Image (cartoon, grey):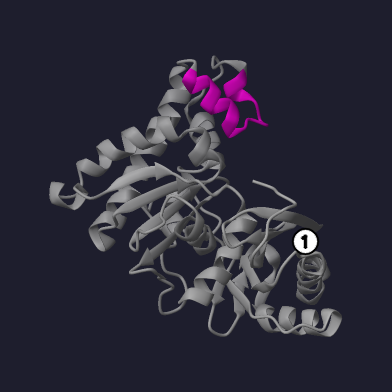
Amino acid sequence: MTTQEATGEFAVGVDVGATKIAAALVSNTGEVVREGRAATDATDGPDAVVARIAQVAGDLLENAPGPVRGVGIGTPGYVDCPAGVVRNAVNLGWVEVPVARQVAEWIAAHHAVQLPVYIENDANVQALGEYVFGVARGIDTFAHVAVGSGLGSGLLVNGRVVAGASYTAAELGHLVLDPAGRPCACGLRGCVETVVSGPGLVRSVHASTGPDAPAWARDPELRAETIVAQARAGDPTAVAALELAASWLGMTFAVLVAVVNPALIVVGGGLGHSAFDLLVPAAQRELARRVPAQSLDPLRIVPSAVHSSAVGASALVWHGVNS
């Protein structure tokens, strides 16, 4: 929702991706007042990218219709939240970058205002967005699973993000289900996201097609959207690819249920939304085969409600203020 008439308190949310930086000025009720965007251009180096993050955030601060409580940033990589440091963000080329401090200093220097800057892994930010503004409001123990170009996940237990000893908790996309399976970008084989993702769907279709397959299935530029559309039309190759992904997704849900016993699993991401009805019912059947029934009694699996990554990042501010 976008409005030019929102009043009250505000936060700036910034989502840092491999290709773009998306930002929004967000009210404490989740309304997007203004938006900003810049190219990431990660090859320019971390200092240049951090400056662009700060500049996009600062531009939104300048036009805020009320007091701004802080800046929330979601980034790839392993994020040491207390220190404000991002480590090993491979797709940005970052080894160790003190993003929160640098952004706070830039804003103070260019806008003469001292603001807290919160930073978190992008998957955890999506979970917080649902907790503060979305379908997980009032639910303190839940998981968010985003199915898109990969599989990302975030976990809250008793209202707090589970980061882990080395900030790698809930990396379910790189849980190996088949050690002899497809190679993954992380260096392992058979990770969940090699099957449960847009590229995973494409690999499933290409692996199962021969010379007599329909043209759409042999297309070297095949996209997940085409597979979903073909599955809805009843194409057996597309249906089989979705069924395999659903089975692996159900096994992933089983790990969450066995370890955490969440009340809710929120499914987001582009593919998670577009194919929710094709993936989740079959995933639930697989889940039911793998955990005791009493673990499933409180569990609901629902689509996400917060679709803006920048709104999710802004939730870091409200979660930090209220913690």
Kindly identify the residue that appears in the image at 21 percent across and 48 percent down.
296
Query: Is 19 placed above or below 217 here?
Result: below
Q: How many residues crowd around disc 1 within 10 Å: few (fewer than 14), some, or many (20 or more)?
A: many
User: Residue type at mark 1?
Assistant: Thr
Nearest the viewer among 186 and 160 is: 160
Tell me the element at label 1: loop
Say which quadrant the C terminus sits in.
bottom left
Residue 81's quadrant in the figure?
Answer: bottom right
Kindly identify the residue that appears in the image at 54 percent across and 49 percent down.
306
Q: Which residue is mark 1?
A: 40
Q: Which residues are magenta?
A: 216-232
Q: Please name the predominant secondary structure of the magenta segment in the image.
A: helix
Residue 241's quadrant in the figure?
Answer: top left
Q: Do we see residue 16 in this rendering?
A: no
Residue 223 highlighted magenta (yes or no) = yes
Query: Is 26 placed above or below 232 here?
Result: below
